[in-house]
């Protein structure tokens, strides 16, 4: 009998860690594979779980590390019941104040790694398998002073929606999670740039517990998008009906508050 595995990237902290905790409680797998760069933090998370955990220490911007995860999947031939791509980061600032390295890193981790990890896991998923890609409400609008981050999350949203269509009939459900601000380490990292205070306050930040709970429920209900808050739903509607020049002007006012 194949071992059931739930694979969570970005599991050392924030939303990824919370996914690992809630999937553990749901007993959806025989083993949780938790992936991040920080091995010590992963070991701490593993110690909080009842489900046995396999620690995958990996930098998902590194092709060799992703190749190693592919090899582990091929060697063990698990049944991947859940794939959660939660690894990612953002930076505040404009094109001049965000470094070239940070801009490239956001594209690599937020976009390319999501695609590569999804493609690595899909051959090992069966009917009933579930994919949750952590995008953001930033995916709904172009956001000056967060331009690369918002664009990278728009990529995740569009990729997930198209993938979902391709998976029709397979019994595998894909959902894009699009929350607004979440109380994690995101803000600390985002402010570590030349324009770190271009976004002054993270208004209405949610708890990771509620965001993950809503994401798991939305995925079970076969929703394509999990907004996880009224604010996110409002931004989704704004993105559909309001011209971008107007929505960007509104964002300019909000980010200065």
Image (cartoon, rainbow, N blue to C red):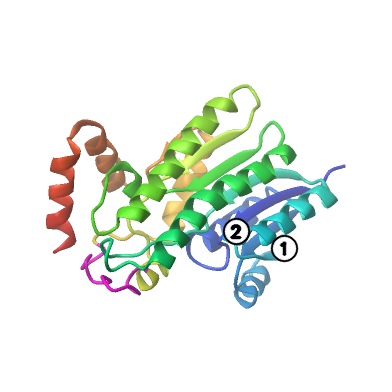
Please say whether residue 178 is visible from this viewpoint.
Answer: no
**For residue 53, which numbered disc appears in the image?**
1
Residue at numbered disc 2: 20
- x, y (%) of residue 3? 81, 48
Quarter of the image that includes the N terminus? top right
Residue at 43% of width from left, 40% of height from top? 157
Q: Earlier in the sequence, mark 1 or mark 2?
A: 2
> Magenta part of the protein: which range?
190-202
Q: Is residue 177 left or right of residue 220?
A: left
Q: Is residue 111 left or right of residue 154?
A: right
Quarter of the image that includes the C terminus? bottom left
Residue at 82% of width from left, 46% of height from top? 77
Residue that sits furthest to the bottom in the current view: 40
Residue that sits furthest to the top in the current view: 169
Residue at 61% of width from left, 47% of height from top? 116
Residue at 47% of width from left, 62% of height from top? 105
- x, y (%) of residue 111? 49, 49
Of 64 and 127, which appears nearest the observer?
64
Q: Is residue 201 magenta?
A: yes
Quadrant of res 12: bottom right
- x, y (%) of residue 187? 35, 69
């Amino acid at each position: 009998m194949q071992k059931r595995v739930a694979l969570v990237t970005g599991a050392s902290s924030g939303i990824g860690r919370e996914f690992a905790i809630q999937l553990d409680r749901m007993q959806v797998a025989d083993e949780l594979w938790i992936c991040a760069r920080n091995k010590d933090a992963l070991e701490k998370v593993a110690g909080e779980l009842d489900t046995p955990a396999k620690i995958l220490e990996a930098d998902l911007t590194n092709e060799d590390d992703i190749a190693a995860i592919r090899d582990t999947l091929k060697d063990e031939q698990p049944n991947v019941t859940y794939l959660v791509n939660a690894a990612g980061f953002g930076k505040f600032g404009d094109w001049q104040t965000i470094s070239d390295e940070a801009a490239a890193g956001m594209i690599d981790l937020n976009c390319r790694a999501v695609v590569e990890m999804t493609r690595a896991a899909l051959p090992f998923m069966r009917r009933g398998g579930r994919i949750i890609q952590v995008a953001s409400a930033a995916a709904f609008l172009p956001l000056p002073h967060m331009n690369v981050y918002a664009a990278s999350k728009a990529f995740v949203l569009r990729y997930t929606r198209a993938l979902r269509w391709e998976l029709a009939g397979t019994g595998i459900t894909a959902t894009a999670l699009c929350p607004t601000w979440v109380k994690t380490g995101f803000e600390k990292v985002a402010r570590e740039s030349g324009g770190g205070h271009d976004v002054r306050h993270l208004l209405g930040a949610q708890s990771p517990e509620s965001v993950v709970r809503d994401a798991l429920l939305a995925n079970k209900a076969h929703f394509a998008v999990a907004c996880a808050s009224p604010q996110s739903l409002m931004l989704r509607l704004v993105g559909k009906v309001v011209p971008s020049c107007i929505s960007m002007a509104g964002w300019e006012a909000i980010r200065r508050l």
